[in-house]
Structure formats: structure tokens, C-alpha cells
């Protein structure tokens, strides 16, 4: 997927504005959102990290490609500050100058022949097992250096609340995807 630098800037500016507004900060002028990409079906995730150490402060997204990219981007940007993993110490308005924002636009989910049939540095993984689902973005494999087995095991335990070898169960269904990463960029700059 080719995304122009102007559209990349607009994606990040829009997502940052939604996050800032949700936290009570003053609105900014809206970027140009005329690129047709915003009205196409699109799944995405929005991630917040600390600038100083890249510590995750939130990552929420939507896999449902029945929504437009604008709908997915708006929903993920509104929800990222309420990431359940950080409710003890939620993101605050005063923290915004110390955060970066990143948007990951997902390609289509594709079934694989074997649970190990993916490249940990290129693909995101989405696992369904007994009514539960979990997902790791491609950045997880790149940043951690985990093997396929480690990624699948951690996905089972951390995202599905299942046994680490659940991915081997015939009832488990793995789908992979590629993604276009936009950012990171400071939320306030």
C-alpha cells in the first residue's frame, strides 16, 4: 500500500488530535483528510509510547474491515487511552508532551497452511481459539526477536488467556497479515 507523506502526516495528526481531545486538550486544526484511503475499508491499531524509553502506554485497534479506515482510526484513537492494561495508571493530558503516536494499518487477514507458516519479522499474527482471539502486530516480532514458537506461545498466554501450546490444537486458527506502519511521531511537538 502506497501512502503519500502528506497522507501519513494527516493520519498521525488526526489520531493525535482525537487522543488529545479525549483527554481535554485544546483542539487543533484538522488536517486534510481528502485522500480516498480514509473512505476505503481498513483495519488499524493506534499505539502510544513514551518518547524516552519506548515504553508502551496503550495499543488498541480494530480488525473488522467492514469499517472505513476513518472509522477504525477514530475508534482506535478514542479507545487507546483506555487500554485495560494501563487502567491503574491511565494516560493523562499532562503526559501528552512525552508520548509518541503510531498507526498500524493492517492488510487483509490470510489463513495459513501451518501455524509456523509466517515470517516473525514481516507478519502480524491473529489467533482464534475456542471463542477467544488475540493479535500481535508485526512490530512485536521485530522488537522482541522472538521465534515463531515464542510469538505463538506468548500470544496464547498474554492475549487469549490460554495454555502456551494452544496454538498447536487443531481447533486453533491462525491468520497472518502485513501492515503499513505510520509514525511514530510526537503527539505534541
Image: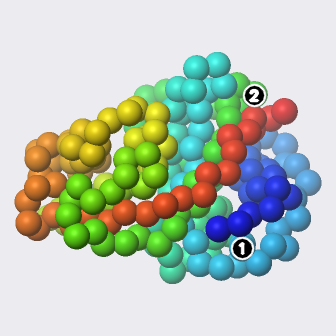
Q: Residue at x 74, y 51 (%)?
A: 12
Q: Which residue is mark 1?
A: 37
Could you say whether the residue bearing mark 1 is in a helix, strand or loop?
A: helix
- Give the left or right position of residue 76, taking residue 28 as reference: left
Residue at left 43%, top 46%? 121
Would residue 145 be visible to someone looking at this image?
Answer: yes
Q: Tally the numbered discs.
A: 2
Q: Quadrant of the N terminus?
A: bottom right
- Placement of 55 over or under 139, stated as above or below: above
Give the residue at mark 2. 97
Q: Residue at x 21, y 43 (%)?
A: 149
Find residue 172 and report its horizontal and vertical position in percent: 16, 64
Q: Where residue 3 appears, x then y in whole percent?
A: 74, 63
Task: Farthest residue to the left: give it.
Answer: 169
89 left or right of 187? Answer: left
User: Would you say 139 lies left or right of 169 here?
Assistant: right
Q: Which structural element holds mark 2?
A: helix
Image quarter for residue 150? top left
Please tell me whether mark 2 or mark 1 is closer to you in this view: 1
Amino acid at each position: 500500500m502506497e501512502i503519500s507523506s502528506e497522507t501519513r502526516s494527516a493520519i498521525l495528526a488526526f489520531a493525535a488530535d482525537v487522543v488529545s481531545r479525549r483527554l481535554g486538550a485544546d483542539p487543533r486544526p484538522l488536517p486534510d483528510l481528502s485522500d480516498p484511503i480514509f473512505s476505503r475499508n481498513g483495519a488499524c491499531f493506534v499505539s502510544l509510547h513514551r518518547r524516552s524509553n519506548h515504553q508502551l502506554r496503550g495499543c488498541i485497534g480494530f480488525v473488522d474491515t467492514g469499517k472505513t479506515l476513518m472509522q477504525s482510526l477514530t475508534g482506535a484513537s478514542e479507545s487507546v487511552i483506555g487500554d485495560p492494561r494501563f487502567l491503574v495508571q491511565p494516560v493523562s493530558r499532562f503526559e501528552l508532551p512525552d508520548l509518541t503516536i503510531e498507526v498500524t494499518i493492517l492488510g487483509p487477514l490470510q489463513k495459513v497452511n501451518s501455524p509456523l507458516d509466517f515470517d516473525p519479522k514481516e507478519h502480524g499474527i491473529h489467533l482464534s481459539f475456542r471463542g477467544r482471539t488475540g493479535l500481535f502486530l508485526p512490530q512485536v516480532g521485530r522488537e522482541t526477536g522472538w521465534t515463531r514458537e515464542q510469538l505463538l506461545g506468548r500470544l496464547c498466554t498474554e492475549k487469549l488467556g490460554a495454555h502456551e501450546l494452544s496454538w498447536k490444537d487443531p481447533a486453533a486458527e491462525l491468520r497472518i497479515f502485513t501492515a503499513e506502519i505510520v509514525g511514530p511521531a510526537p503527539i505534541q511537538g
